[in-house]
Amino acid sequence: MSDLPPPSPHSIPHHRAEPVRPAESPSRAMVRVTGSAATHQRRMPGRLLFASIGFGVLFVAIGVKLTDATILSPAPSRIAQAPRVPAPEPPVSRAAITDRNGEVLAVTVRGTALYARPAEIDNPARVADQLVRILPHLERDRVLARISPPRQFAYLDRFITPRQQQAINDLGILGLYFETAERRTYPRGRDAAHVLGAVDVDGEGIAGVEKWYDERLRTLREPLRLALDIRIQRELREALEWSIERFNAIGGSAILMDVNTAEVLGMVSLPDFAAANLATAPAEQRFNRAVTGVYEPGSTFKLFTAAMALEEGRVTLSGGFDASRPIRIGRHEINDFKGKNRWLSLPEIIAYSSNLASAHMAMAVGPTRHREFMGRIGMLSRSGVELPESAATLHPSQRNWRDINTMTIGFGHGISVTPLHIVNGVSALANGGTLRSPTILAVPPGVEREGTRVISERTSEQLRRLMRVAVTDGSGRQADSPGYFVGGKTGTAQKTNERGQYQENRRISSFVGAFPMNAPRYALHVLVDEPKPRADTGGYATAGVVAAPTARRVVERVAPLLGMVPETDRIPQIQASIALPLSGTRARSGTAAAPTPRPAAPTTPTPAMLPRTPAPTLDQPAPPIRRTDAHDGIAMPRLVLAPISPETGRAAR
């Protein structure tokens, strides 16, 4: 082998040796490209030119389009025209309450609640001072106690305004937090406060409709529509307030009802309160006299006694009873105040408000039938209205319902009921004889509510005439309003003290009636609690001068709201169709009148009729009335009686 080194890679083979050229500088060095790479390099300029032309054409087209769309013929922006729909808020937790016309009476609104975590607050005293300046309705000591240990959590205010929230947030206090809250508001203030009731801080109903329909209001979103008409509610309140102020009374109530559906169109109790302030209202303001207060109805009950006697066939419109001598019961006696001291026809009994004749009329039916009728007309049970405050009536039990009870209840004493009981019962007397449970909810138009027939249509027609006589010729004259043909009955009853004794200077004055009596549509009850006598009323504070004028004021104000106009051009014709003469068939002088036999009854008696008992015979000289269904040996209850006005029904000692 040769010891020579291998040739350099840059050496030229010996067989292709060429002359050696001087080395060129790196800047002038050239690379020779051969084959496909050379071909690709030759085509590159053409491709670049073609791409440049394409991009140029594209940009020119875009520019032309933009020029046309923005300068030459601009198109309206679709984004600007698209409606902006805000994100829907979750529904509130409690449905609204409206009146029959859709006016909002109660609604829930959203707000902000303020709460604290005391463990995170450094200086509770300073924080309390700052919060009270922003929320002046809070008490500093109470706030300090809530934000101080060992409490872990405390609400400071359940509902604050956005401005207050911002002011508290600007304080930068660690330990104060906000959360979304709800508050129940009552836009009408005091209007219908007793009916609506209220909710507690947790939004749960605690009184009125809010409590009765609590579950419905929390589960359904549709507003709860009441039968109330807020316009009528306001007129009732103003008229009642006028009467209370005029006679310096302590309170009162007023109810307007549809006689055909038993819808309560208006219900007022005074004094009242703002619905939002139920928790802080005094007890006398929270007390609902219309459905919670039970009172002796006085002479208004004589309408039911007359209806019972007519239905049982114990009297006719031309018949009557003796009212010439007192009824003696032990050491006491029942008498009329300034009575006529003679036999009275049925229209006269109602017009002159005779206690004696009413007691005889009730006894003609008898205690057993009397109690059954009182139960049938709804006077022995709760009214059934959708209010938790509805009270039970006070009445003798079946075992203790004796002759003395029938006599006194016959003229409206010895039983206590609510004003709603009275107006609902009179609605049945006026509407043809059907009793329906009163309702606070609106009844859809055209829907007929079920009811129970308590008297026949014929008896109802007779009662309408008697109610009209009591207004045209009796103590209810000041309730009459020309063209509206009001009918009804006044009643004045004394109140009792803590020992159950009647007090002469404390009374309840009331009026119950319906209008128009030729075609009754609405029933009305007005009650004034403890009115004081006035000089311009002759020193009287009885129902004829207190409640009757208030009733007229109500009728004349609410009738136009109900679409009624006074028929003043037909007063003589309409009055003639419902008129009833006062005088009846008079009994022989010196003898008591036996009940006039009832005309022949139809072969098939109405369901409301019950088997009749023979009428008792009254011998002179007016001994105690015979007991009809009591056993011998049962002591008669003591009767405490005192003389007052002819409408009181209170017997004289």
Image (cartoon, grey):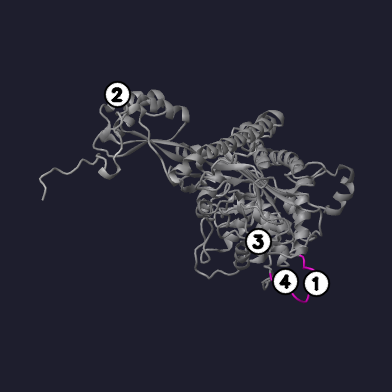
Residue beneath the point at 56% across and 42% down: 106
Q: Secondary structure at mark 2?
A: helix
**Hey, what amino acid is under mark 2?**
Arg
Is 598 inside the magenta-drawn segment?
yes
Tell me which segment is drawn in magenta.
596-607
Taking 336 as reference, is 418 left or right?
left
Q: Could you say which is closer to the camera, residue 228 or residue 409? A: 228
Q: Secondary structure at mark 3?
A: helix
State which tag comes first along the sequence, 2 or 3. Answer: 2
x then y, percent, for residue 171: 36, 24
Of badges 2 and 4, the one in the foreground is 2
For the residues bearing labels 2 and 1, Cβ distance under 8 angstroms: no
Q: CA distance from mark 2 to mark 3?
A: 76 Å
- The dot on residue 362 is 3
Q: CA distance from mark 3 to mark 1?
A: 22 Å
**Hey, what amino acid is under mark 3?**
Ala
Of badges 2 and 1, the one in the foreground is 2
The image quarter containing residue 319 is: bottom right
Total marks shown come to 4
State which tag comes first along the sequence, 2 or 4. Answer: 2
State which tag comes first along the sequence, 4 or 1. Answer: 1
Residue where numbered disc 2 is placed: 126
Q: CA distance from mark 3 to mark 4?
A: 21 Å
Task: Answer above or below: position of 87 versus 621.
Answer: above
Q: CA distance from mark 2 to mark 4?
A: 80 Å
For the residues bearing labels 2 and 4, Cβ distance under 8 angstroms: no
State which tag comes first along the sequence, 3 or 4. Answer: 3
Give the class, few, some or many, for how many residues have Cα within 10 Å of label 2's Cα (few <14, many ≥20).
Answer: few
x then y, percent, for residue 158: 42, 37
Q: Secondary structure at mark 4?
A: loop
